[in-house]
Amino acid sequence: MKIGFIGLPNSGKTTIFNALTKSKAEITAYANTRGEPNLAVVEVIDERVIRLAEIYRPKKTTYAAIEFIDFAGLSEGSGKGDAFSGTAMGLIKGVDALALVIRNYPDDLMGMPSPLQDMDQIDLEMLVSDLAIVEKRLERIARFYQRGQKTEALQTEEKVLRKISAHLNGNQPVRTMELNGEEEKVIRGFQFLTKKPLMVILNSHESNFGRNEDLLDEIGKKHGAIEFAGHFEMELSRLEDKAEALMFMEDMGIERSARDRLTHFAYSLLGYISFFTVGADEVRAWTIRRGETAVEAAGVIHSDLSKGFIRAECFSYNDLLECGSEKGVREKGRFRLEGKNYVVKDLDILSIRFNL
């Protein structure tokens, strides 16, 4: 899973990034819209993977991973230019979701916080950016027509883009559109910003953290939202003494680390589930979207498994714990063979049979 952090300058994006990844990326008090993104990959520590490793004692244990990308701050009017160009655009096209960080504390440069206005401003900037992409492509299609290249594919693309243009001009993001399979295929390469799932991280000062229920409810009318005390949690992530860290967390009413909370929130909001592969060589967790099939899960492991898919050997994590071993799972009739259209469930343990 890849999550890209966006927000206005001095919103605390990099502070949140450091809190989640234990990185030491430079935090600047000045707007910088041209800096290179900060990147970090973190493991999703999962107690279920730990338990499976205890059972199978593999040579290697691999957790699922999340890649966090901290983009430079967006200033007003960014969508009209090239806020996401070069390296940044190449990276943002590949993210699975965007996390919008909103400042909820006073700042010497930016003044008092205005979370709802900031959210609306970034929403608008992304709409403008997507509109610019649509208009540029429509202009190019018009030039193809002038050269006599009015193909059926181009006409179909034009129709879909004009539909999207009308939706965006109505101040509605692409993610709220009802598009059929063919239309989805036509626009897949554009990677519109407003098509990507968006979550909001309310970055509060520790003095008012946990006291913003009304504000979170208001944000929640548009986007899923979660609150962090960014600077406090960045310092917390750097403490070596776990007992001391737990004491500070208890004082703040924080039950889990920022990383754990965001991971759980992201999985729930984006509709992700985990399945596992197990054996003497490796126990590993994999991430797929809820509703995906066995053949799609096979493709996540390796493209060859998807291409040569025959069937999936399947049993559940809970059945394994209840029966005590794979042998017990088989003896109690909990072991299954599933076809390519089987919808994988959370906590399934899969072994893919394939033939190339």
Image: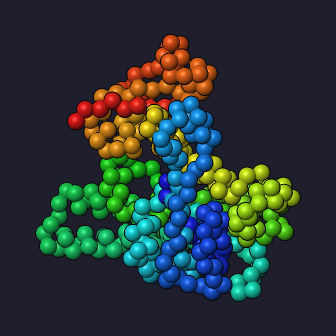
Q: Is 354 rendered above or below residue 265? A: above
> Can residue 49 be seen?
yes
Q: Of all residues shown, which one is farthest toward the left?
A: 148
* Depth check, front residue: 211 or 327: 327
Q: Position of residue 4 (x, y in %)?
A: 52, 64
Q: Of all residues shown, which one is farthest toward the right?
A: 251
Splitting the image into 4 quarters, where does residue 216 fall? Answer: bottom right
Residue located 60% across and 44% down the image = 46
Residue located 63% across and 83% down the image = 28
Splitting the image into 4 quarters, where does residue 121 fall? Answer: bottom right
Q: Position of residue 220 (x, y in %)?
A: 68, 56
Viewed as shown, does residue 236 lie left or right of 8?
A: right
Residue located 23% across and 61% down the image = 154
Q: Position of residue 112 (x, y in %)?
A: 77, 79
Viewed as shown, does residue 144 lie left or right of 119?
A: left
> Can residue 289 be seen?
no
Q: Quadrant of the C terminus?
A: top left
Q: Is 353 rendered above or below residue 71? A: above
Residue located 17% across and 60% down the image = 151
Q: Position of residue 168 (x, y in %)?
A: 47, 65
